[in-house]
């Protein structure tokens, strides 16, 4: 597997509890390199565009409220098999089902307030990276 890039978010529940460094330590320990990172505060409409694929789901409004409730840290991670590796470090969506040592097992509060986002495929990663970063901001 070649070097890949993926998109990651440290979500409001985690920034609120000052967990950015703790989460970054787990990402870096897994061999993922943070090649871009910034702290932003989304509007609800911006969160809605990002999660547009979930627009018909019952939790969509709650999700957009949550993602715009406090600052987030958006990141581009680079490494071998980065998409899958980041999904592994993040753990299952529901923290009750997340494996030991994962970000969501250790830090997530609930299935909604689950501390981290990671792209689910290289194609999604490219779209998500382009939503938040310009090429000049990616410093590999
Ligand atoms: O890729 P994931 O973040 O693991 O999961 P996903 O793409 O299925 O869902 C995106 C986010 O939507 C997830 O991180 C949290 C939220 N979500 C998913 N399922 C539920 C949910 N939020 C609530 N409140 N209830 C759900 O069942």
Image (cartoon, helix red, strand yellow):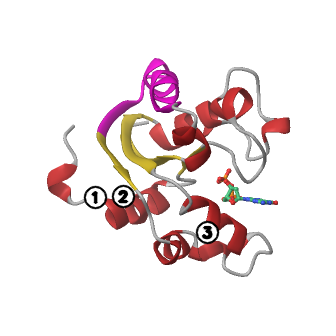
Mark 2 Cβ and ligand 1 under 8 Å apart: no
Measured in 3D between alpha carbons, the distance from the residue under mark 1 to the one under mark 3, in whole angstroms, is 20 Å
Tag of residue 64: 3
- Label 1 Cα crowd, 10 Å radius (few <14 / some 14-19 / many 20+): some
Start and end of the magenta stretch? 19-35
Q: Nearer the viewer, residue 111 or 14?
A: 14
Q: Nearer the viewer, mark 1 or mark 3?
A: 3
Percent across and percent down for residue 99 are: 76, 28
Percent across and percent down for residue 44 are: 53, 73
Q: State the quadrant of the C terminus.
A: top left
Which structural element holds mark 1?
loop
What residue is disc 1 on? 133
- Label 2 Cα crowd, 10 Å radius (few <14 / some 14-19 / many 20+): many
What residue is disc 2 on? 129
Q: Nearer the viewer, residue 36 or 13?
A: 13
Q: Nearer the viewer, residue 6 or 42?
A: 42
| Quarter of the rendered image showing ligand 1 | bottom right
């Amino acid at each position: 597997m070649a070097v890949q890039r993926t998109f990651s978010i440290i979500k409001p529940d985690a920034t609120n509890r000052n967990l950015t460094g703790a989460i970054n330590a787990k990402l870096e320990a897994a061999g993922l390199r943070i090649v871009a990172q910034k702290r932003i505060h989304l509007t609800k409409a911006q969160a809605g565009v990002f999660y547009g694929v979930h627009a018909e789901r019952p939790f969509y409004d709650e999700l957009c409220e949550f993602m715009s409730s406090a600052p987030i840290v958006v990141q581009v991670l680079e490494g071998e098999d980065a998409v899958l590796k980041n999904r592994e470090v993040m753990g299952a969506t529901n923290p009750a089902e997340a494996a030991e040592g994962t970000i969501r097992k250790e830090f997530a509060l609930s299935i909604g307030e689950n501390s981290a986002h990671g792209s689910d495929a290289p194609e999604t990663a490219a779209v998500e990276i382009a939503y938040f970063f310009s090429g000049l901001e990616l410093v590999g």
